[in-house]
Image: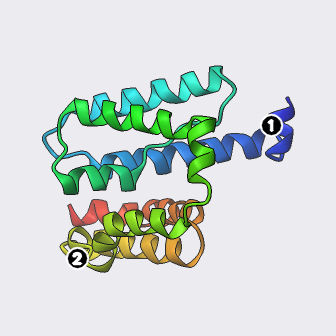
Amino acid sequence: SELADRLGGWPSAVVSATAFAAVDFLAIVSVVDAGAPLWRELTAQGVGCVVSGVCGSAPVGGSLSRSLVAKMTGASSPAAGFVCGLATLALAAPSISALLAPMPKAVLAAVVLAAVLPGVVFPKDMLALSGIEALLAWTTTVACALSDPTKGFALGVVVAVLLWPLRRQAD
């Protein structure tokens, strides 16, 4: 098909889609509270991707920064997600988006940085790791920082596979 050709053929399209799904899965898992039902988040993500595909759109991805801002402000009910979705739809309307176009990108960048930067500057979960898990986490993080998230994630998967025998021995 035309889309697969634009992505470099079917093999490249499948690899790109798999990498997108894996990175998006990790983003969702990283912001869901330990006691929250993960299946709801993943089901919603899957339904969103199917609906966007049926409508001819690109796959949808969870917004890590939006989720972190919601957590910072104390939004915890399903209504918060609903209100955020409605606000996103309203702001994406052509008449409204034309009004927002002149807004400096620095405003959006400030919101994203306020949400994400504390976890980057002091990654407490990663600092708590030791041994093989720490090696894997830091290798993936550095690879993402020096290249891009997809390539960093791919390197992390390769390192995880290579370290699998050592992890099994440690258990």
Residue 79, above or below 155: above
Work out whether residue 132 can be spotted: no
Q: Position of residue 51 (x, y in %)?
A: 55, 22
| Distance CA(mark 1)–CA(mark 2) | 41 Å
Horizontal and vertical percent position of residue 104: 55, 66
Rendering quarter of residue 57: top right
Above or below — where is 127 with respect to 10? below
Task: Answer with mark 1 or mark 2, whichever residue precedes in sequence.
Answer: 1
Circles 1 and 2 in contact, beta carbons < 8 Å:
no
Q: Position of residue 13 (x, y in %)?
A: 73, 42
| Residue at point 25%, 78% (across, down) | 122
Dot 1 falls on a residue whose secondary structure is helix
Residue type at tag 1 = Ala
Which residue does the numbered mark 1 point to in the structure image?
4
Relative placement, left or right, of 13 versus 155 is: right
Seen in the image, is 89 located left or right of residue 70? Answer: right
Q: Where on the picture, by quarter, is residue 50?
A: top right
Query: Tag on residue 127?
Result: 2
Badge 2 density bin: few <14, some 14–19, many ≥20, Cα 10 Å? few
Which amino acid does the dot numbered 2 rest on?
A: Leu
Residue at 38% x, 26% y is 43
- Eyeballing the image, is 69 above or below 122? above
x then y, percent, for residue 150:
57, 59
Vertical placement of 3 versus 101: above or below? above
